[in-house]
Image: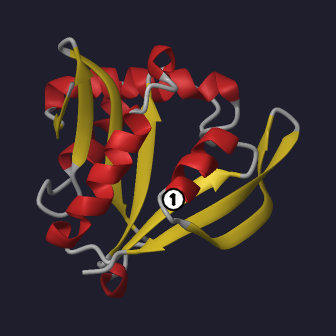
Amino acid sequence: MKVRNAIVSDLKAIVAIYNASIPSKIVTADLKPITVESRLNWFEGRDPKTRPIWVIELDDNVVGWLSFQNFYGRPAYQQTAELSIYIAPNYHRRGLGKILLEKAISASPSLGINNLLGFVFAINKPSLNLFYQYQFEKWGYLPQVAEIEGCDRSLIILGRKIII
């Protein structure tokens, strides 16, 4: 198993893993699959020194990924980053999300990050449990802010202060 910085040739696997999460209706607010082309600017706009995308490999296959995203896009928030973690369905419950989250927490000071955020649908118990296991706290609650196939989804904002 290896965690490394993503390279552009990983984007196809990153998108496939993301798209595999859409049918569950509990992970993302995207309702239809995205394309590699639609994510190219997102990928290329990253600075691996401050907002990396990492992939986790098993047997030379990308089976999960984590990205750091700017929060709110204004300079005063530069020390805060939103995390996204996606694991291929066949690799759920193997501890890969834990590995990525632990690495994100430990690497945050070197990335200039003092606060980590996760935006998780309230119905997504596995993701909530993962973040709570690593001392993330509920920093916000947005009731019924998304609608997926007639079902309202509330969003929980999880946060963790990084001690430097």
Location of residue 51 in the rendering, given as x and y in whole percent from the top left corner: 23, 59
Q: Is residue 34 visible?
A: no
Are there few (<14), some (14-19), or many (20+) residues within 10 Å of tag 1? many
The one of 94 and 78 positioned closer to us in this rendering: 94
Q: Where is 67 relative to 141, above or below?
A: above
Q: Quadrant of residue 57?
A: top left
Residue ID at (17%, 14%): 60
Q: Where is 112 relative to 1, above or below?
A: below
SS at badge 1: strand
Location of residue 89 in the rendering, given as x and y in whole percent from the top left corner: 51, 19
Q: Which residue is mark 1?
A: 118
Look at label 1 and name its amino acid. Answer: Gly
Location of residue 141 in the rendering, given as x and y in whole percent from the top left corner: 72, 68
Which quadrant does the C terminus fall into?
A: bottom left
The one of 140 and 30 positioned closer to us in this rendering: 140
Marks counted in the figure total 1
Left or right: residue 51 versus residue 73 is left
The one of 42 and 93 positioned closer to us in this rendering: 93
Residue ID at (16%, 31%): 8
Q: Where is 34 relative to 101, above or below?
A: above
| Coloring scheme used | secondary structure
The one of 164 and 39 positioned closer to us in this rendering: 164
Residue ID at (62%, 39%): 126
Left or right: residue 153 versus residue 124 is right
Q: Quadrant of residue 125?
A: top right
* Residue positioned most to the right: 150
Q: Is residue 101 visible?
A: yes
Which quadrant does the N terminus fall into?
A: top left
